[in-house]
Amino acid sequence: MSDVYFCDLRTGFNNSLLDKLTRLMEKAGIANIDFKNHYAAIKMHFGEPGNLAFLRPNWARCVADEVKKLGGKPFLTDCNTLYVGGRKNALDHLDSANLNGFSPLTTGCQIIIADGLKGTDDVDVPVDGKYVHSAHIGRAVMDADVFISLTHFKGHEATGFGGALKNIGMGCGSRAGKMDMHSQGKPVADSSKCIGCRRCEKICAHGAPSFENGKCRIDLTRCAGCGRCIGVCPVDAISEGVSNSNEILNCRMMEYAKAVLQGRPAFHISIAVDISPNCDCHSENDVPVTGNVGLFASFDPVALDQACADAVCAMPPSPGSMLSEAAEHTGDHFHDIHPDTSWKQGLEYAESIGLGERKYNLIRVR
């Protein structure tokens, strides 16, 4: 069984939560990674503007300082979003990060948006999975020598919860990668929004976009599903096509996580506080579904997600939360708030493709 290290949130004089996170990383063995003069990507979510449940920059500073102490060159990173919002291109993304308190001054390291200005700077990483043969991953993520996930553990409306594996798989996909995971991989154009600028036509290598009466249509027989047209459209007239089922989304996401992690050292941290029912991509956050739980770390992202899920599900529902008002109370909090999801299916698939194991030893760190 994999080891998962855990700290509760009790503090005292000269023993802050950041002190506890440092001890947690050290006890979990982060120093076993060779960081000397190596670039270390710290993958986290900077929070959609309006959302207040995202991890504070202080947590990121603690991780970055530990990496620097071990001789590494850390940077914080995330990829642009597929949906329209405050993080769909690198400029808006950095503005959103700054608004939420992330800067080199507060975090002690630089911030790099991994898939570039328009979300099109990616690397095709071979996976040879059941659903994904080549994953589109943000270039800066793949350029790093060491990968660290720093995850806010919370609920999610499509995958049940958002844990380390979602932070890695979905979070490191470029805009084309996110389309690949979320949909059948072919974009569609909304003629009512199209302004006829033809930027999509110019960037497409396959001649898929064409124009009738100044409005774009996409020939799906020509389209390769790269998503470049989504990135260049200035009015968001092009979007992903038919959505995949949540089960296929989970499987594709796990194969993307495998693409990110294979072939290099990785370490994973999850912080189970402000456990909102939905993703930090929302421009709002609802009442936390349970009270705060604690800090977790492991080299095994599957075991880490399982341990976090178990710990949250062992907590009583918060009064007035979506969980307290759920139609059923089965003990599986995430399924109760999002009945159409199955996080267990996602972890089972992750285990089956060698990302880790669901059985774990929980080791308390004080």
Image (spheres, rainbow, N blue to C red):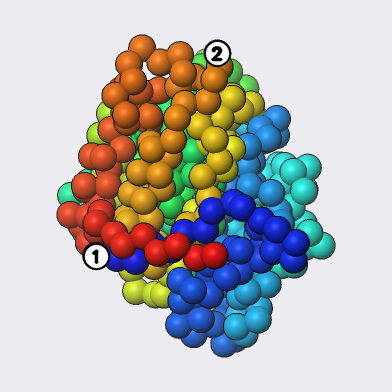
Q: Residue at x 66, y 78 (%)?
A: 68
Nearer to us in this view, 87 or 290 = 290
In the picture shown, does residue 235 fall above or below 111? above
Classify mark 2: helix, strand or loop: loop
Q: Quadrant of the N terminus?
A: bottom left
Relative image position of residue 177 (x, y in whole percent): 41, 47
Q: Residue at x 63, y 74 (%)?
A: 66
Relative image position of residue 314 (x, y in whole percent): 38, 38
For label 1, the crowd category at 10 Å Cα-Cα, with few meaning under 14, some 14 to 19 and many 20 or more, is few
Nearer to us in this view, 41 or 223 = 41
Horizontal placement of 17 versus 31: left or right? right
Q: Residue at x 60, y 58 (%)?
A: 77
Nearer to us in this view, 153 or 165 = 153
Relative image position of residue 290 (x, y in whole percent): 50, 32
- Camera-near label (2 vs 1) is 1
* Tag 1 residue: 1
Cα–Cα gap, marks 2 and 1: 55 Å
Nearer to us in this view, 294 or 146 = 294
